[in-house]
Image: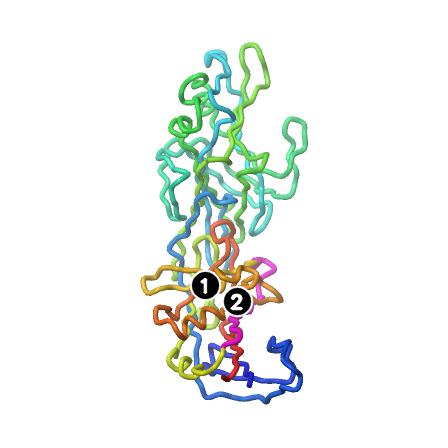
Amino acid sequence: MNKYISTFCLCATLLIFSCTDPNLIGLEVQPPSDGITVTLSSVKNNLKLSTISEDSLRSDETSTLLLGHQVTDFVFGNSWAAFATQFQLPFNNVDIGNSDSLFVDSVVLALSYAGIYGENNQLFNVTVNEISEPIFKDSVYYSNHIVGYSNQLASLNYVTFNTEDSVIVGGEMNAPHLRLKLDDNFGERILDESGTTNLEDNAQFVEFFKGLVLSAADGTNNPLGGSIVYFSPSAANTKLTIYYHSTNVDSLSLDFSLSGDAARVNLFNEKDMSQLLQQTDTSTNTYIQSMAGYKTVIEIQHLDTLKTFFKNKAINRVNLSFELDGSDTADFSPHGRMYLVRVDEQGKDYFLIDYIVEGEEHFGGKVENGKYTFNVTRYFLQLLNNEDYTNKLYLVAAGGAVNAKRTILPKDKISFNIIYTDL
């Protein structure tokens, strides 16, 4: 006999449903003659859900760089993003002439937009400092890494993050990007190294110039402003350019890229639970936020009861589903995908065996029809039969180090559905 179990975390009751509509329970191959009746089981189960803050996220060598300050979120509170990055030479053995004959016109850091979270055209105060301690491409860095810096190369007020309008550079239209003017003396310091070992190759260059760290604060002191902007380090318009002239030639330039082997790391502010608890009631909802914000802990309780109930039963399919709150997704879009990971006794995270064996599409986690649904059949079988498996899972943001999204999930709309067959 096939039975369908639906477990709701608040009622803590395992409901076993059967019906004559096989599509409802995903048994499309079940013959129509095998109709069965609705059954209520006395077997008890409970999903305990809670929200905790992330300590930090690994955030080095990310595909996007995040910058900004989000202060409009009355649920999750304030969030800020900064980043540090190295730069790469345009070619080895840079020798553009005698430094005494080279004169800087301007230094511009250009960053191509890859998206934005929050409102467009917000005003920010942007600070650019030179890194004083090296970062390394082959090292691991986390979002709470403290970057040492020295020289301030720019402090720019009322900078607009405009991700929509094209930018005119040299009389030509370019895709939307941010342009920040830096201290001319910084450009002169680099041009002074023309023909020296400091511009011989990238290894020498990053020893001489360790990189930049950028931060941004709301530029209006308005509690209703803010956004987090995404930049692409590999886009054509992302570069550090020194515009200069020589005694003989005008309108020269030298570009340094942020891609290739340039080390980089996104940096986020710490978000402890007190910040979230000031804004909302975590007894009714659970919360997930990128940028080392928050994650949801799921504990499958009454495991001994489950093991007893499913003895001599074949588990066909197990789904764990989370429905969106939907109340403020117009202003703050939720995550497009979540990940579900298990936690061992030492607190180390692992991808579920369903994800590893079956792949991402089979495992699920992509938001569809306002829900995140995961196929956790293999995990549930291991939970019943493997004493080394813990009953604790984390629901976390996909791409948490490269986006600023946040998601609210009502606890009464989370379900644990099990399809099984009596042996």
Q: Which residues, given as a range, are shown in magenta?
A: 315-334
**What residue type is disc 1 on?**
Leu
Q: Position of residue 369 (x, y in %)?
A: 62, 67
Q: Is residue 291 above or below residue 256?
A: below
Q: How many marks can you see?
A: 2
Q: Position of residue 250 (x, y in %)?
A: 59, 15
Name the secondary structure under disc 2.
strand
Q: In this rendering, would 303 be left or right of 24? A: left
Quarter location, residue 201: top left
Q: Position of residue 257 (x, y in %)?
A: 51, 32
Query: How busy is the neighbourhood of tag 1: few (under 14 within 10 Å), some, or many (20 plus)?
Result: many
Question: Closer to the N terminus: mark 1 or mark 2?
Answer: 1
Q: Is residue 328 magenta?
A: yes
Q: Is residue 320 magenta?
A: yes
Task: Please give the name of the residue rendered at 39% of the width and 79% of the height, measured from the top-left corner.
Answer: 302
Q: Is residue 70 above or below residue 356?
A: above
Looking at the image, is mark 1 or mark 2 nearer the viewer?
Answer: 1
Task: Give residue 247's mark.
Answer: none
Q: Is residue 12 above or below residue 176?
A: below
Which residue is under mark 1?
A: 352
Q: Position of residue 215 (x, y in %)?
A: 45, 41
Q: Is residue 50 above or below residue 238?
A: below
Name the secondary structure under disc 1.
loop
Which residue is under mark 2?
A: 374
Residue in front for this viewpoint, 362 or 175: 362
CA separation in Å, label 1 and label 2 = 10 Å
Q: Is the C-beta separation of discs 1 and 2 under 8 Å?
A: yes
Task: Please give the name of the residue rendered at 47% of the width and 83% of the height, measured from the top-left corner.
Answer: 13
Quadrant containing the N terminus is bottom right
**What residue type is disc 2 on?**
Phe
